[in-house]
């Protein structure tokens, strides 16, 4: 989870080095895309991407962006290239400020060259539909957003948002992760990339539907009372994950974990 805008950097990026499983210095974008693109199967795949301080905070002063840097943002943008759909919780939309173009021109060209739409689909999860239809998220959206909500959502908000997005029920009393995956895959959107927030990740954890977690460990001690990367009230058994790779850049670690038993496998 991080800032919604396209990353722009004037200076060259610090070198990104892989230290596990095999060492590789100063990785290229092609190498990074290959490493992150290696999946155990071709069916539905749910990936979450988060950043955390060393002392466990997922946000600083209410946002995750300050915990990252240019390298984190760059890898973050590469993950978007690989996605069929970007899924965001409404709380993250409000906190981080998503709106406008989410992919760089280079990323759009890359996707077209690889037989993909120029942009991934964009889905927002909101049980209450507490979103402003006149916000940048909708007014400046390059692709019509998909809103995943509940049957009990306010009828007036639904009507207003249906003018600017496709509103689909993904549950009766609450948005259900299994319904989200089913709805997205029925639209041919099998590579599901989520950028938060903690409540959304927690709900997918509780449902046993996290196939992959990309976690950036920021070399800072944030202190305060910032949220963890996952929050959920329901009790559930811990889910075993295995380490797929470790990248390092200027003391920042970018960890990729895969589920021991991929949850979204058909």
Image: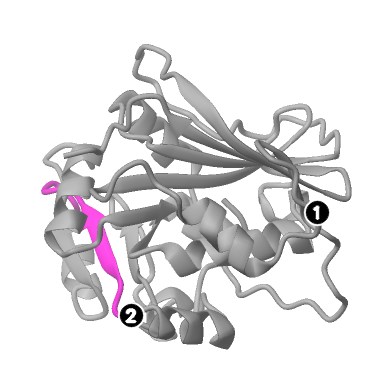
Q: Is residue 234 left or right of residue 97?
A: left
Q: Quadrant of residue 224?
A: top right
- Residue at 70% x, 34% y is 57
50 over 72 or under it: above or below: above
CB atoms of marks 2 and 1 within 8 Å: no
Query: Is 149 part of what is drawn in magenta?
Result: yes
The 10 Å Cα crowd at callout 1, few under 14, some 14 to 19, many 20 or more, is few
How far separated are the C-alphas under marks 2 and 1? 29 Å
Residue range highlighted in magenta: 144-153
129 over 8 or under it: above or below: above
Q: Quadrant of residue 206?
A: top left
Label placed on residue 25:
1
Q: In the image, residue 116 lies at what x, y percent?
A: 34, 77
- Residue at 85% x, 33% y is 221
- Residue at 28% x, 32% y is 263
Label placed on residue 238:
none
Label placed on residue 115:
2
């Amino acid at each position: 989870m991080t800032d919604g805008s396209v990353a722009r950097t004037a200076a060259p990026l610090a070198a990104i080095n892989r230290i596990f499983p095999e060492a590789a210095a100063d990785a290229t974008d092609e190498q990074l895309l290959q490493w992150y693109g290696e999946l155990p199967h071709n069916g539905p795949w749910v990936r979450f991407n988060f950043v955390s301080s060393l002392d466990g905070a997922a946000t600083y002063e209410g946002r995750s962006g300050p915990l990252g840097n240019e390298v984190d943002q760059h890898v973050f943008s590469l993950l978007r290239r690989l996605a069929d759909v970007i899924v965001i919780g409404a709380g993250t939309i409000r906190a981080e400020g998503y709106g406008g173009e989410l992919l760089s021109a280079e990323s759009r060209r890359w996707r077209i060259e690889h037989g993909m739409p120029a942009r991934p689909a964009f889905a927002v999860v909101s049980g209450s539909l507490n979103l402003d239809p006149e916000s940048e998220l909708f007014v400046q959206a390059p692709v019509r957003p998909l809103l995943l909500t509940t049957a009990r959502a306010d009828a007036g908000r639904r009507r207003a948002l249906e003018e600017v997005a496709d509103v689909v029920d993904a549950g009766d009393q609450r948005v259900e992760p299994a319904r989200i995956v089913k709805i997205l895959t029925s639209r041919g959107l099998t590579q599901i990339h989520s950028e938060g927030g903690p409540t959304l990740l927690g709900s997918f954890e509780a449902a046993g539907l996290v196939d992959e977690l990309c976690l950036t460990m920021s070399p800072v001690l944030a202190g305060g009372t910032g949220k963890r990367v996952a929050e959920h009230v329901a009790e559930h058994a811990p889910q075993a994950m295995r380490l797929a790779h470790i990248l390092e850049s200027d003391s920042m670690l970018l960890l990729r974990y895969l589920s021991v038993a991929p949850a979204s496998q058909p």
